[in-house]
Image (cartoon, grey):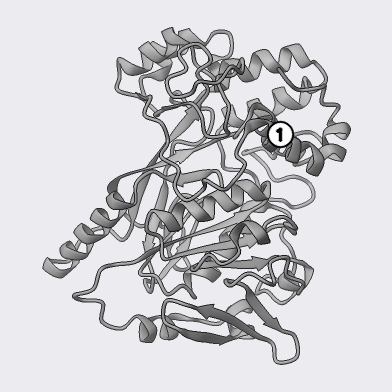
Amino acid sequence: MTMSTQDVDCALAFDKNNLKYQTKIYDTQKSLIVAFLVAFCGGSQKTIISERRGDMSGTEPTWGVVATVDEPAVLVAAFVRHHLAIGASEVHLFLDRPHPGLAPLVEGLKGCFVTLCDAQYWEKSSIGFRPEYHIRRQKHNANIAFHHTQCDWLLHCDADEFVDNGDRIKASLALFHDAQQDAVIPYLGIKLRNNERVWCPDAKPNTSSDSSWGQTTVFDGGFRFSTTLYDDVIREKFKPFGMYLKHGLSGHCSGKTMSPVGADLELGIHRAFKTGTHDPVNRTSSTAILHHFDGLTPLHYILKMLKRGYETPNGPRSRQAPHRSGTPPRKGSHRRMDQALFIRKNASDGAKMKRFVRMVKSVNAAQIERYNAFLAFDTTPFDLRGCAELDLSAASFDAALLAENMEFFEMAGLAYWGD
């Protein structure tokens, strides 16, 4: 396995001859070596987990994050740096493709663990091949991390999702721990509610940008929350594209889950499930928020929708029936699929694309006021930590997107994109 981050302190080493998977665990100052065939071919790790964790009473719970990533290196680095800076003990990255520029951006970061999911990785996995559907790859990788982390809790999320406040995570874990000591509790997970970043070209609540999108860095903007009252009282403010939003968001409103390591669980995308079942575990809520940057720039959002729009020759996989190739049906919102279809259909019409993206991904003063009436908007700037050395300008980010995806953009017929 060729690692693009071979010189990074947090590198994972793969021994082809002995089929061993070695992880350097710096917090315990020792190496945890697990047989590769057990780790990646379906063997149970429950005994290892319970022995390793032991009695956690009287100690402060630790937490980590896992993500399967296919994003520009600077975003992946920001994801790692921010979460380590706010208190995560570990960040596990599974690279869906090589990231040549990532190594120097995360070099020396204690607690960062990187695995390249190349052909050999998937060949030796319990699946035996690289799943076509990215969500299946995400679930597999998340559960590998879940069975090998040294943390007490693990959050499975995407590289464009950032926990807002580590102290709130710490408080939530402490409360959960105390409740477990006092009595049997009816939940086995902690939900982080998500909001969604939007651009504010008119109000510009937290940026001095001169961009027509109200954006200088990729993290500028305000945050809207989902509300079940959207269709009744807010949707009219987004005509004619209001039908593309669900509960007031263009992306998901399901939140993500922190799961207790060692429990008999399988991690999903939004929730954890009792092992071997489709029964999601009950969750309690955290005061911590997960900021969802659903499109770091307008071009980034378009790329996400184009990838979804080209999942099959005819568009996104339908919820109703599997594709004839055998790919399972998608479980996502039909409104999200409609966004992808619109982007795919109109990629060559620059004016129409800009109007659509502006209507579903930015808000004006009147729209903010309507969200505020239902306590569903926050103008507080995102407090990004540990990333002062990174170039997070929107222009630089878009340049990386174009360089890495030009062939795909040309295939899709995407018109020139810019202010």
| Residue 118 x, y percent position in the rendering | 75, 66
Q: Which residue is mark 1?
A: 398
Q: Residue at x 44, y 39 (%)?
A: 291
SS class, disc 1: helix
**From what the image shows, is residue 142 above or below residue 25?**
above
Q: Residue at x 28, y 47 (%)?
A: 285
Q: Residue at x 64, y 31 (%)?
A: 394
Q: Is residue 397 visible?
A: yes
**From what the image shows, is residue 380 above or below residue 259?**
above
**Quarter of the image that includes the C terminus:** top right
Q: Quadrant of residue 209?
A: top right
Q: Quadrant of residue 29?
A: bottom left
The amino acid type of the residue labelled 1 equals Asp
* Front one among 246 and 218: 218
**Quarter of the image that includes the N terminus:** bottom right
| Residue 62 x, y percent position in the rendering | 34, 66
* Front one among 33 and 338: 33
Relative horizontal placement of residue 238, taking residue 273 as reference (left or right) = right
Question: Outermost residue, left direction?
Answer: 182
| Residue 55 x, y percent position in the rendering | 26, 81
* Front one among 35 and 330: 35
Q: Residues within 10 Å of mark 1 (few under 14, many from 20)?
A: many
Question: Outermost residue, bottom direction?
Answer: 18
| Residue 371 x, y percent position in the rendering | 37, 17
Relative horizontal placement of residue 90, taking residue 410 as reference (left or right) = left
Q: Residue at x 66, y 79 (%)?
A: 13
* Front one among 12 and 339: 12
